[in-house]
Image: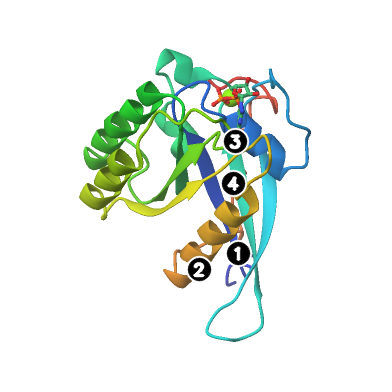
Amino acid sequence: MAAATSPNLYKVCLAGLSGVGKTSIFNHIRGKEFSKSPRAETDSCNVSCDVEVDGGPPVKVTLQLWDTAGQERYRSLTESYFTESKAVIIVFSVDCPESFQEVDREVKRIRSKDFSPNALYFLVGNKVDLKREEVSQARIDDCLESNRDVFFGYTRTSAKEGTNVRQLFDNIAQTLVSRRVRPVEKGPGFQPFIQPHKKKNCCWF
Ligand SMILES: Nc1nc2c(ncn2[C@@H]2O[C@H](COP(=O)(O)OP(=O)(O)O)[C@@H](O)[C@H]2O)c(=O)[nH]1
Ligand SMILES: [Mg+2]
């Protein structure tokens, strides 16, 4: 029997140095209020997007977005976090040059196939509501120019004010569909991303 038709479901992960606002972006898109100390849990939420393809009726896409439980603090985001990701959002904070240096390290890891090798990568500069931007646009442009084969987009966001967060996910959904990235097969072989023997919200590592 043929596998059941898959919905347009894609796993998407957040990455980037601790403190850049990953959990805040995650919380914003799932409608939670902004907090000065958001609780980090390994968790996922579904983000629904309508994508226009070739002028036809909108296609429904679900992005299954994953946040870290703060493992990045110990440089211990393991391969299992990225497994099956179709897109990875690498976040830095515009007020924190160190977080931008981390982007360079992450690009090196992507190039050495340490990260999810088949995912599309999206760069995000978060906290644009802050007056002090310490990462110059010239540095960002350089990074995008020399990594044109890595990043499919750059978005300036504020998780605090909600600036561009929705647009980021719409853009990711649009890119995945227009590049004909295969969604998760939800047929008989489908596995939820949570490891079956572990409880939801429980740390994997
Ligand atoms: N001003 C401002 N602060 C933010 C923004 N996003 C996150 N923060 C704050 O930055 C800190 C770290 O955020 P968090 O989401 O936990 O970062 P994570 O470690 O990458 O998950 C928290 O105090 C947040 O309230 C933003 O867009 N603007
Ligand atoms: Mg977090």
Q: Which mark is residue 8?
A: 1
Alpha-carbon distance for marks 3 and 2? 31 Å
- Whether residue 126 sits left or right of residue 138 in the image: it is right
Q: Amino acid at mark 3?
A: Asp
Which residue is found at the position 67% from the left and 43% from the top?
Answer: 162
Indicate which label's residue lies in the foreground, 2 or 1: 2
Residue 130 is situated, as x and y percent measured from the top left of the image, at 56, 30
Kind of residue indicated by mark 2: Val
Q: CA distance from mark 3 to mark 4?
A: 39 Å
The CB of the residue at mark 3 lies under 8 Å from ligand 1: yes
Q: Element under label 3? A: loop
Dot 3 or dot 4, earlier in sequence: 3
What residue sits 54% from the left and 37% below the top? 128
Q: Which residue is mark 4?
A: 191
Which residue is disc 2 drawn over?
177
Does 5 sit above or below residue 133?
below
* Residues under numbered marks 3 and 2 in contact, where contact means CB atoms less than 8 Å apart: no
Q: Residues within 10 Å of mark 4 (few under 14, many from 20)?
A: few
Q: Are marks 3 and 1 in contact (CB under 8 Å)?
A: no
Amino acid type of disc 4?
Answer: Gln
Residue hosting label 3: 129
**Residues under labels 3 and 1: Cα distance?**
33 Å
Number of labels in the image equals: 4
- The answer to whether the residues at label 2 and label 1 have Cβ atoms under 8 Å apart is yes
